[in-house]
Image (cartoon, helix red, strand yellow):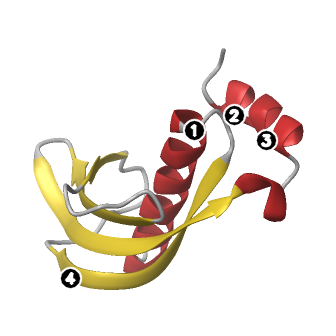
Amino acid sequence: MPGVLLIEAFAQLSGWLEAASSDFKNWFLITKVRQCKFYGFALPGDQVELEVERCSESTPQHRVYSATGRVGTKRKIVIEFEGQVTPFEEIEDQEDQRRFFRILTRE
């Protein structure tokens, strides 16, 4: 899996985290990758487990996240990134995205 797609996966996961945490009032849009280190490739057939954590320096309108991607016990990527919190209604229909989230999470 190309590294840029791993970064995109973290951005999307952070967006869904922000949406679910705010009752779909907000979305996260990545603006800057502060630091990123790769420790190997995610190969076809690998299952990459993503873990995202909001950093303490985050504010209500600006978020900072640190994240790790692993295949099994092997670390593949460590990243720190930041971005803006945007009202969900400005970019997507909230109800459509709620339904989509229920599908993604198998609720």
- Could you tell me which secondary element the residue under label 1 belongs to? loop
Q: Earlier in the sequence, mark 1 or mark 2?
A: 1
Q: Nearer the viewer, mark 1 or mark 3?
A: 1
The three-letter code of the residue at mark 2 reads Phe
Q: Quadrant of residue 33?
A: bottom left
Left or right, residue 89 beside residue 27? right
- Work out whether 23 lies above or below 42: above
Residue 19 seen in this snapshot? yes
Residue named by callout 1: 22
The three-letter code of the residue at mark 3 reads Gln
Q: Position of residue 26 (x, y in %)?
A: 63, 51
Count residues near mark 1 (Cα–Cα under 10 Å), then give few for <14, some for 14-19, many for 20+: few
Nearest the eye: 89 or 42: 89
Residue 1 seen in this snapshot? no
Q: Are marks 1 and 2 in contact (CB under 8 Å)?
A: no
Q: Residue furthest top?
A: 107
Q: Position of residue 107 (x, y in %)?
A: 66, 14
- Could you tell me which secondary element the residue under label 4 belongs to? strand
The residue lying at 19 percent from left, 41 percent from top is 72
Nearest the eye: 11 or 75: 11
Q: Earlier in the sequence, mark 4 or mark 3?
A: 4
Q: CA distance from mark 3 to mark 2?
A: 6 Å
The three-letter code of the residue at mark 4 reads Gln
Q: Earlier in the sequence, mark 4 or mark 1?
A: 1
Q: Position of residue 105 (x, y in %)?
A: 60, 26
Specify the label residue 97 is tagged with. Answer: 3
